[in-house]
Amino acid sequence: MSTLKLARSGSVRRRGAAAAAILIVLVALQLAITLSVLGGARGADLSAQRAGAIRALYAAEGGMSMALREIDRNSDEDGDGAIGSISADANPATGPVMSFARANVTRTDAGGTATLVARGLMGETLRDLRSQVTLTSAGGGPGVLAEWWPMSGSTNSVNANGWSGTPTRTEVLPLINMTSTGGAPMWPGGPTANGAARFSGFITVPQAGSWTFTLESDDGSRLYFNGQQAINNDGSHGMLMVTGTSTMPATPVPFEIRFFNNGGPWGCRLYWQGPGVPARVIVPASAFSR
């Protein structure tokens, strides 16, 4: 009887040892699976981070290219109200989407140089690029580049034109001195009303310092230096003067005037007053280049 009990006791011990071994194997297998899943998750996270960083970089590069093109063409192509910036509120979350990420470019001018900072945002990943552009005359000779567009109807803002399409007429003017007139075409063969123009190039003051500019127009107009608005004379009105003061270097500064006529007489004139020019006068042709 005792032998039988011993045999059963040995059998129980063997079964217990086998069960423990199986349990150890199962725990090890579960641990391996858990580590594999965690490793895969970490790998997926790393891959997502890499993809986000690449997309943020592509967005920054795309934004920088847009800003440099605006400066090269002296044109606000993204319509944010400034040349050389993209979504100029400095918030990348509101910028245009490029390669699934958002782009934002800010511009700061000093000493004839524009510093551009482009930022790409993908989720919480940011990538920044920086570039500097020397602001000099484009070497196209004297005068002002004038681009003209017809308008399909009435408006109260220069921004209604869009400014991104191909102008109907392009010409070079010696200066910006168009007195208010009615019945005359806005350009040869053009309409007598409901038209828009962009005047652009470089302006050079005879002495560095504080200069007062006056923009007179019928109807609305806006003046920009280095892509930053200097005078807002927008709206539908008769010949009206609006003045603004800017600190100017004695080197060529990019400028742009946007102008529209809503109907009736039209005109646009630019004046200055500053060091060596004590009274307000029309900006002379010698100040302009393109």
Image: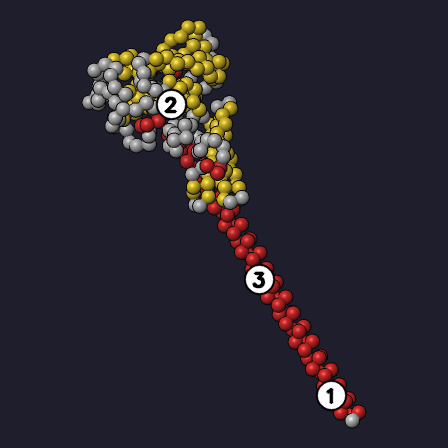
Q: Residue at x 32, y 13 (%)?
A: 239
Instruction: Give whichever of discs 2 and 3 has the lower sequence position.
Output: 3
Mark 2: give few (<14), some (14-19) or many (20+) Cα within 10 Å. many
Measured Cα–Cα span from mark 2 to mark 3: 60 Å
Instruction: Please state which of the two labelled residues, at mark 1 or mark 3, is closer to the viewer.
Output: 1
Instruction: Give whichever of discs 1 and 3 has the lower sequence position.
Output: 1
Kind of residue indicated by mark 1? Arg
Q: Residue tagged by mark 1?
A: 8
Q: Residue at x 33, y 30 (%)?
A: 162
Q: Is residue 233 above or below residue 56?
A: above
Mark 3: give few (<14), some (14-19) or many (20+) Cα within 10 Å. few
Kind of residue indicated by mark 2? Glu
Q: Residue tagged by mark 2?
A: 256
Kind of residue indicated by mark 3? Val
Query: Could you tell me if residue 202 is visible in this image?
Result: no
Q: Is residue 242 above or below residue 92?
A: above
Q: Residue tagged by mark 3?
A: 37
